[in-house]
Image: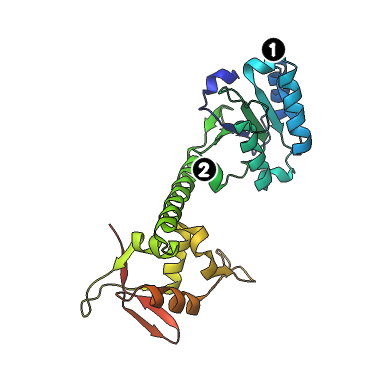
Amino acid sequence: MAIKMLNPLPKKTICIYDDLGQLGKSDLADLMMQKFDAILFEKADEKEVFPAIRAKFDQECEGFCKWRVIIFNLTRESPLYDSVEFTQLLEKITDGSFMKAGWDGEYPWVIVLGNRPIMYTATTAANGGRIVFLKLDSIDHKLVFDRHLDLKIQSLAATAQNISTITDESAKSGKDPKVIAFEKTFEPSGPKGRQSASMVYTQLIDQLIDMYPTLFKEYRTFGKKPKVGGEDYVYQKQKFHEQFMVANFKNIQFSGTQGYYSYYIKKKA
């Protein structure tokens, strides 16, 4: 595999994974170390990783300085797949904030070899989707771009950017960001006496958390026993109804029976 043919954008981490164990990760890592004078890690301790990269760069190793290939070879049982700290470490490496003069605009290839995708975060996605996921095809053993996972990251990036815009608007206006988010998304479904379909509070909270997870998470928590085939949630219905809906939206009609509230609203076009 020629690394130059992957053609990444600047500041990218490439996650190459193989869930069937056919990749021969160690052989691939050895090949890249020989070809590009790459530096290899199996753990993710900043106290070891940053000094090792700086030392390799300061020694002016011709191959490393030219290609700048940094490899993490993860075992199947590695805890790093689900580690937010590991993702943050990868971001710091690509940024070069730990280097004396950064990467001088020539960003490194950070390659993660593993048996499944590593975690991606809202921060990672908001910064342009810094992780590229390539999966080994089990039929022809070629590396293929994981388009399904990329679409998830794009969605996460859009959500993070939207929330960032709302937060900035809130800081300027002094208005509650939750109210701004709601007004950007929903509107009354019709005048009094001509109401269209209503949206119950559980459905509404679910949609708000899907679109703005950090803003509305206080209104829904995990239950003790997950339901079969889905998650069991506890909804803060009184808090949501009284402190948010009734307190902020006088023009939205609602109906309620024993605390089971329905709101006459619709999504904006």
> Percent x, y for residue 131?
56, 36
180 over 38 or under it: above or below:
below
Label 2 Cα neighbours within 10 Å, binned few <14 / some 14-19 / many ≥20: many
Q: Amino acid at mark 1?
A: Glu
Q: Is 253 displayed left or right of 128 in the figure?
A: left
Q: Quadrant of residue 101?
A: top right
158 over 231 or under it: above or below:
above
Q: Amino acid at mark 2?
A: Ala
Q: Quadrant of residue 109?
A: top right
The residue positioned 75% from the left and 33% from the top of the image is 49
Label 1 Cα neighbours within 10 Å, binned few <14 / some 14-19 / many ≥20: few
Q: Secondary structure at mark 1?
A: helix
Measured Cα–Cα span from mark 2 to mark 1? 33 Å
What residue is pinned by disc 2? 125
What residue is pinned by disc 1? 62
Q: Secondary structure at mark 2?
A: helix
